[in-house]
Amino acid sequence: MKRRIISNPLNLEFEPFDNYGKSIEGMSWHKISYEKEKGQGSYILKMDPGAKSIPHEHVSYEEFYMLDGELIDADGKVFKKGDFISFEPGSTHSSFTEKGCLILVFMRSRNKTI
């Protein structure tokens, strides 16, 4: 059986987050099982203080677990360390962080930019 153990998500190699075709300033990721062509799998997303995601629509479920820091959604909802968030298909949003954050993301399909 093949397996991969990540014992410290703060001590990983991250590369620029380019899931939408170009890198987004202040965002980087460490792919765990993510297949970019299919938009499926999991990864750890790191957002530096002041980083903002681009507005997007969820084609399928997207779920994430806040490992560290805070993330503020477009509606003002603040996600904090320990929160588990599930976005249903058809939902739209963008998020930003003032302090920075680390997120474990589970994707079932690629999002559409809006």
Image (cartoon, grey):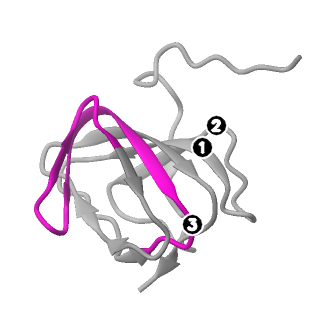
Please give the name of the residue rendered at 19% of the width and 68% of the height, measured from the top-left corner.
74
Label drawn at residue 90: none
Quadrant containing the N terminus is top right
Whether label 2 touches label 1, CB < 8 Å = yes
Q: Does residue 13 appear left or right of residue 40 in this picture?
A: left
For disc 2, the marked residue is 32
User: How far apart, in angstroms, are the residues tagged by discs 2 and 1?
Assistant: 6 Å
Q: Is residue 25 above or below residue 103?
A: below
Front tag of 1 and 3: 3
Please give the name of the residue rendered at 55% of the width and 73% of the height, measured from the top-left corner.
59
Front tag of 2 and 3: 3
Extreme-top residue of the structure: 7
User: How far apart, in angstroms, are the residues tagged by discs 1 and 3?
Assistant: 14 Å
For disc 3, the marked residue is 60
Q: Residue 60 location, x and y as percent? A: 57, 66
| Magenta run includes residue 22 | no
**Range drawn in magenta:** 57-84
Quadrant containing the C terminus is bottom left
**Which picture quadrant has residue 64?**
top left
Crowding at dot 1, Cα within 10 Å, few <14 / some 14-19 / many 20+, comes out as some
Q: Earlier in the sequence, mark 1 or mark 3?
A: 1
Q: Is residue 29 above or below residue 23?
A: above
Q: Secondary structure at mark 1?
A: strand
| Magenta run includes residue 73 | yes
Tag 1: amino acid = Ser
For disc 1, the marked residue is 42
Q: Residue 5 location, x and y as percent? A: 64, 16
Q: Secondary structure at mark 2?
A: loop
